[in-house]
Image (cartoon, coloured by chain):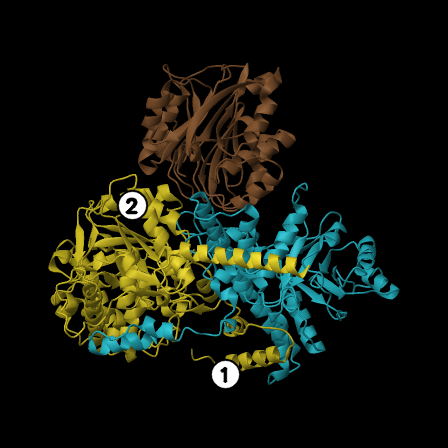
Chain colours: A brown, B cyan, C yellow
Amino acid sequence: MCGICAVMLENCKEHFPIGSLLYKMMESQQIRAQDSTGVAIFNKETNKEFYKIDYYRKINGVYCSFTEKVSRERLASSMNQLNKDPDIILASFAKEMNLLKDVGLVRDLELKYKIKSVLGTHGIGHLRIATSSRVNPYNAHPFSTTAYPDMAVVHNGEITNYSRLRSSLELKGYRFFSRCDSEVIAVFIADQILRHGNIEKANYEFINKADGPFTYIVATPDSLALVRDKNGARKGIFGYNPGNKGYPAFWAIATDLSALDSVGATHYIETPEPGKPKIFYNQIKISSICN
Amino acid sequence: MIRRAVLELAKTGIPRSASMDDNIRKTRDLNPRAINLWDYVTLIGAQLSRPAYDPYRETINLDISIGIGKSRKIVLNIPLIIYGNIGMDSYSLDSLHLALNRLAEGGQIVGLILDREINTKKDKRKYPLFKKISSISENQTSDLLGEHNDTCADGLVFEYKDDSSVDILRDLRERFDGPILVDVSNVFPSFNSILDLKTDGILVDTEKITKNSRYNGKHAIKVICDARNALNGYYKGKEESSDNAILVIAGDVNSTGKIAKAAALGADIIGYSTSILIANSHIYSEKPYDVISIAENVYRHMIGTKEELRGIPAALGYSDFHNISPSDLRTSSIDASLQGNIPLEGIDKTYLDTIGGIIDEFISNKELNMTCSEVRDALKSMGGE
Amino acid sequence: MPYSKDVLDLKRHILKAAETSRSYFDLNKLIVDVRKVNDSEVPYSGLGARSPNDYFPSIKIIGSEIKPKENDVSYNEIDTTFRLGGRYSSNVISTNVPFFVSGMSYGSLKLPAKIALHLALNKLAKEGINMIMNTGEGGALPWELYGSEESCSNISKKRHESILDYAVRLLKEHNLESIDRDLLFSRFYPLVTQYASGRFWKDPSYLLNADAIEIKIGQGAKIGHGGLLPGPKVTDLVAENRGIPSYKAAHSPSRHLDILGPEDLVAKILELREITDWKSPIIVKVGCSHVYDDIEIILKSYADAASIDGFVGGTGAAPWELRDIIGINTVPSLIPSRKAIEDYYSITARDEFKLIVHGSVWDSERIAKCIALGANGVGIGTGFLLSMGCTLVQDCYTNVCPAGLTGSYEKLDIEQSVTGIVNYVKGTLSELKNIAGSLGRKSINDLRKDDLVATDELSSMLCGLLLEDGVTFKDLVKEKVKKAIDSRDRRINERLENK
């Protein structure tokens, strides 16, 4: 693991090429981690009609990528099939989220997917240097899960009791697609959300149960959460850019200060207390609650 | 031998005529039983791919709670319960009591399993006592439930003998609200029916079990592995809760290294006998019956043990002792790999998985023609079952 | 260990109690329990763990001899070069000795032992045998860093004076004032300084005057545990060199506080490269545990070499139980390490990355086996102690040592030790050349896995070696499987017949 970053517009009524901000932050850290990159960008204005499932399927020993568009009605049966198929590895399960990841550098990702021009209200990014699972596209972050759509996790650190957490989630019936410990965060949080819907509580539960030094960002259409383990062994900071004529105000999260510098998010720089998640809510959701 | 090899060179600088490894090879025929299989098992530590914790500067948790569902909970600060099939005189017992009290006062609660009452008239017991019973009479029951005195036990260890023990256990469960640990050594490894009765924990004495016919010649490693598999098998598919019965392992687990390895294999708590030995050693000392100084000995030993126990998960990359898992174990012995399903060092696969992989290769290359059941049987026979 | 009478009595009493109990007690580590009873502290031990199976005796080098056969020509021309650096560093250390002195710090080793090593290596270098030495984590001694006029030219007069003053105090304390200063204040061998988590140095020359830097993530003897020097060994002079308070136990952090993961290692190495102007080779040392993953990370982190240390590797002081139970053996670590490197080269061009191995290697055959299994170089610690007279008492964490190495320094005869080291190195080098020569190789680096054979199933399986009768491990499995099927068929037939 390596470099995590995230951006959220202060006013989520606007849409902005979030991808370009993430690109800048990731490029500034690229030298430290060059195995793979990935971003997940949220845009409420993307299709509301169907779910998009990106996955890899093993054909003649090689994994090839596929995309399926599934309507709400067919969702349950499609998911069921996917979860049972041993030759499939999930890349993304989304409706409002655009999750793009691959091996290589961030500029390779830009060449392939034009991430700089992807519009959205908020997004997360990741640069990977493999620690314990192999380098391939499906071990790249962000991680998504079939348990819950539009959830993406980027992670820096190790979840040392990963196998224990994974087996207890597998006993409940959840499917894992990689051997990367970061995936367990996505599945765990998804399981918690399904139980009680509260993202803050979900993160606290994970902090209590997980062991090891970690910092992660979990993103949903309505929130971004920056979480550090209870000992605060790994870094994670956020800052604010008040905006200008060319661009709106936004919050940025990163592992390193230099990444915040690269996008001018140098106001109100803070680091969350270890073991206490810092959550940014999508303003649209909050205002709709108030209404 | 090693010294001689280098000294010879250091004196003369002239190349030797034989390497020391040739000599080691010649004397290799050690009696395999003389070496404990535990010595061939190690844990893999945290370096780069996973960073270590620092036990001197960071909090490492050893706490564990005993008691499921509605049972009254007992929390141990060190995952040890003093246990032993060893006789103790009243001086040993008193010194144990003093030491454990002192530990408890300092926030280092360790449990004690005893088959008799403990005299706490002088100072109240601050550590949890598990009373060991195999059958009970009416009088004993009310004593145990101790509404009228404070010698009652905090928990029970019930020695399950055979089918006739079911009713006693059921009765105990209804009337006793503290944790009940059941010693299943006589019926090991089948104890599902015992778990059905909502027991709070299973106690497995590897020393007893390796003496009986089924596990004769096997090592504690196999017993612990089977115990954990049986427990996990019982809970598979059931709703996950942190309220699963705990596994207490006793027997050949009386040093810190073995405690850590047993924990990795699946033990939650260790039934620890060394403290009893220390207490008993007073008979041979120059000042026997000096309860205070024996208690000091037991106390100091436990403090040292606790510090050792804190260092181990930290060196493996965990901040909690109970996160140590089988994936942290490696072995340099085929026998240990078979008995404990432990991956071999270097290749990180168990012996059976390695052989299985090779057999699969042979079958797909058509070098061997075997059915699934033949493969299973072959693996079973090579596994020495 | 000169245990007190009380401690020994206690051991006897507990032993008796164990013997009279009807229970089984494994009494091999009884002394550990006794020590805990004595002082409630975690007991330390010195040197390395005893592994019941360290694989070396189960592997043979086929057809080799460590002494040349009578009619064979002398093998003096056999190449034994080891090159360190060049992958990212502009400097390359080229030495004709593929083994070196592992890090043993001043503090865990007393001054006379360190001086003996220094003088011996100087002597060898003058004879054309330039062996690398590692400072260990306790900082470097003045003559190691300032052993040349050039190294002194960059510092101020005041600084120079204080260095000399410290050196004089060091020699005075150990009654070594009569040593020839010119002989002492020169260094002709390559020096690797160790960058450990304790950061025990104050002088930038520690990094700038070194020929290479080794970032120590961990060592085999105490994987996951930081460096350790017990309080009584932190004398005033040791403390001064390290920049710490005297007589307080020095517990280095278990991890570098600024290296928590691979990207931090990358940042650290790039920082060191900037400081050294990209000149010095950088090695990263880890204890053997998750070896494949660790080497993979090191390969991607701009290092020039990786160093792995088996759990049987020695140390001056480590918590006893921790030393004995954490880590894996040296030989089975070599295989995944080499595989990690080869897997890396399957997608990148081959380069000058080197693999160094430590842990229970102290004679030429073991060195040769390591090289054949994939190492480029070997670190030796205990071997050098033995050549200086070590008697393996394993009390290195105390101030008492019968050989005068890690304690009782007045016992050490420096001249004799220098002779011992020189003979050991020359003899081992000769033996190495003889091994390669008797196999018909021109270079020690041409030793291959094919030159090795396993004498038991386990070594064959873990190292991918043939067994002695030319059988592969897979063949063995096939045989076993066939036998298992045959015996099952026989049992079925017997049952049918009985019916």
Of marks 2 and 1, the one in the foreground = 2
Q: Earlier in the sequence, mark 2 or mark 1?
A: 1
Q: Is label 1 in a helix, a strand or a loop?
A: helix
Q: Quadrant of residue B87?
A: bottom right
The vertical placement of B132 against C38, above or below, is: above
Q: Residue at x 65, y 44 (%)?
A: B236
Q: Is label 2 in a helix, a strand or a loop?
A: helix
Residue C188 visible, this angle:
yes
Give the amino acid at mark 1. Answer: Lys
Label 2 CA crowd tier, 10 Å (few <14, some 14–19, many 20+): many
Where in the figure is residue A93, as x and y percent of width and height?
51, 25
Give the amino acid at mark 2. Answer: Ile
Chain ID of residue with mark 2: C
CA separation in Å, label 2 and label 1? 51 Å
Q: Viewer-proximal residue, B322 or C10?
A: B322
Q: Quadrant of the C terminus of chain C?
A: bottom right
Where in the figure is residue C327, as x and y percent of width and height?
43, 58
Q: Residue at x 42, y 60 (%)?
A: C458
Residue sitting at the far right: B138
Residue under label 1:
C5
Label 1 CA crowd tier, 10 Å (few <14, some 14–19, many 20+): few
- Taking the image as shown, residue B70 lies to the left or right of residue B60, namely right
Residue under label 2:
C269
Q: Quadrant of residue C343?
A: top left
Where in the figure is residue C136, as x and y percent of width and height?
30, 61
Chain ID of residue with mark 1: C
- Taking the image as shown, residue A203 lies to the left or right of residue C227, namely right
